[in-house]
Amino acid sequence: MLRNYFLVAWRNLNKHKLNAGINVLGLGLAFACSILLFLMVHREFSIDAFQKNESSLFEVYGIGYNPKGDEKRAGMGYPAAQTFKSEVPGVAKATGLMWAGSGIRYKNKELDKDVKLVDNDFFSMFSFPVLSGQKANPLAGTGEVVISKSTADAVFGKEDPIGKIVKVNVNGDWNDLVVSAVLQDAPENSSIQFDILARMETSGDYAKQKDSWFHQNHRVFVQTTAPFSKVQVEMGLRGIRKKHYLGDDVLKSLGYRQDANGDRFAWKLAPLASLHFDQDLGYDSTTNKTYLYTLILIAFVVLAIACFNFINLNSARAFTRAKEVGIRKTIGAGKKQIFLQLWTESFLLCAIALGVGIVTATVVLAPFNDLFTEKLSISKLMSPAVIAKVLGGMLLVSFLAGGYPAWLVSRFNPVSVLKGRVSMKGSAVLRNGLITFQFILSSLLICSTILIYKQFQYLRTAPLGFTQESVISIPVKHPNNARMYIDQLRTRLYGQPQVMGVTGSSANIGLGMDNNISKWTSGFLYGGKDISMAILAVDYDFFSTLGIRPLAGRVFNQTFPSDTSSTLTNVVISESLYEQLGKKDAIGFSFYPDSSAPKWSIIGIVPDIHFYSMYEKSTPLAFVMSKYSSLGYILVKVKSDNPLQAMNLINATYKGIEPDNTISPSYLTENTRRWYEKEQRLSSIFFSAAAIAMILSCLGLFAIVSLVLEQRRKEIGVRKVLGASLGAITSLLSSDFLKLIALAFFIAVPIAWYFLNHWLDNFIYRTQISWWIFPLAGLLSITVALLTISFQTVKASLANPVESLRAE
């Protein structure tokens, strides 16, 4: 009987090719879209899921309850890891993790590989298998180093690296270390990536700062053990903080509020699995969960629209099969058999559509990865768990989308059917309701697409307070030599008409080709107030190169030797930092930002600039120019007549100054655009989803209009015989559907305004919801729908009435 069901189902699908084709195309497109979005979301949620100890791994972080908003701090001092391990009940293991620069040398080869410093517990806490060398205790001694498999291949080739001495660049110092082990490369879905791992003790400042809790330069991870809970371990951390850390008296004077335990600052545990979604504690590639839930919602919306098409088409088609069902029931078929027969057709359609969806997703995966800068692989669908979920989803879709039409037909009364008394009233109400809901969802996606793009353009084009156009940023491999490199570059480019200025900065503007974002923040007490700022080390001509003019005083100048004095630090401050200090006449004012540092003297005030992403409020800045401060980036202002030629000139010239630097320069406009890659991706995803949703809605509308016109053939013929014009008939047939689309638009507008307004609240700097967004979305929906309907209605209006009136 099951074979018979599938055989009859196949014959029916083959008989009604247009209906079947639209269903397969719509569902296949929806399945392909859902699969790609599922792979994106699955990848994000799988970050660090491979870690065997994931459930017991935590990062220790500090949180201050500032009245202006909670402040999270990931930095810890050198004593933290070992103190937590030895003195906090429930902490079984602990390790620090610190980025310490890049560089490894062996014989005549030098490669730019990231160096991270850890403690020996790192290898038993995290699941990075040792491929060769010391497996039990890879970093037993401070003179040892562990490298990844890819680093070993790049440095040693076919030579066995174990036991070999290499030079490793640790915070600017080259250390001779012995390779003790080779680790398997960190998986792509690991938040912790590494090339080279060495002991924390190899850091140049370790001997001096090893007992200092205030010298906070690295992260600390702990592994807890049963039966201690997260709350119990945090209480243990509280005791350590009280014993070794900053007291609450100073924080009280700054207005910090108390938590439930009476603390104004506390150490907490952040689960490893949560770090990828934490904007404050995570690494540069963090993802907001709201973004992922939005992707899931889009997948469900697209799939829902395809399902509504399926229900509409099959419900409408059910009435063309009324006589078939009536005859089947007359000769003994029961409701269950009729239902299973029709549901089998739905299942077969969904199975074919799933196949089409998988093939489509596979074909478009490469361009999809390029467009959205993803690293997705269709092989993720091949795991048994994922296959089960996909098949379960397909069964659910076939049951939900095909179940109602099958149930509807199975309830037909055979006597009424054979007498031609089957009513379509209930089906028409459902059909109209589903069409309206489809276009509500489509209108919401169109409104969202327009506003997200508008917000993205606002962030990207907002004035930053400096000139970023035609400025090239060069990441420096050896920051300690940066001032020498800048002088050499100025000399070599002197007289070049394309070059208008050369300077340097300790931090990049935007996200350069090195993918690093650095920020040096500091705070101090002055006049009973908590002064917070970001500190930027710069070189001469920094302000002129970026087109920043002082509001008062002057900027750094080579004619003033005091600008590079070691006993007094001249600083240029931003307007918001000047307002924090509250000094009416700040020029020449001197103060100590740190009791152990030289005195600062303010020589100039400049306007506030957005040196960092506009996700953050404009940061108060202090610009310093100490000859001892390292600069990580060189900035070159060029003429914009020929950007490519200028870039080639700068690149070639700098290669002669720092030949071992493999990181490419980039324009600041490119760098700042990378700040908003997620908005750009989200805008593209919404645009694609809106387009797919509109295509699916119009496919369904096209098929429904075809069926309705087929059922009204005689009515159209009669109207034409009685003298109705082409325009009148077309208007009559189109008006019912256009009313539904207009209703959908008016329902969608307040919903879209509410949710989009809440979405914009996530941004400190935001665009406005312009009134024209909604009429534009409505006009797009109605225009596309009208084009879809018009083709069928005009065709029906032009048909010969004789053909429709003589056919039974």
Image (cartoon, rainbow, N blue to C red):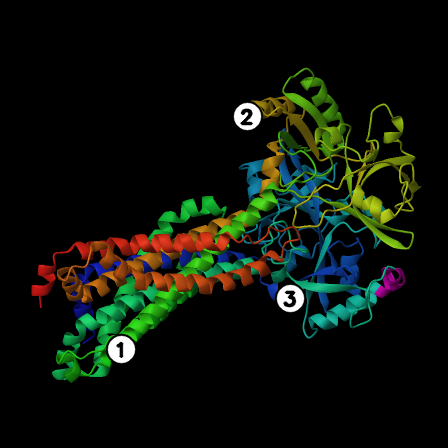
Q: Is tag 3's residue or tag 2's residue first in the polypeptide sequence?
A: 3
Q: Nearer the viewer, residue 122 or 391?
A: 391
Tag of residue 644? 2
Residue drawn 14% across and 62% down?
722
Foreground label between 3 and 1: 1
Residue 258 position, x and y percent, is 81, 68
Residue drawn 89% across and 33% down?
566
Residue drawn 49% across and 61% down?
749
- Outermost residue toward the left? 806
The residue labelled by disc 3 is 56
What is the quadrant of the C terminus in the image?
bottom left
> Over which residues does the magenta segment extend?
242-253
SS assignment at label 3: helix
Tag of residue 220? none
* Mark 2 burial class by Cα count in 10 Å: few <14, some 14-19, many 20+: few
The residue labelled by disc 1 is 408
SS assignment at label 1: helix
Q: Give the CA distance from mark 3 to mark 1.
A: 53 Å
As for residue 251 lying within the magenta part, the answer is yes
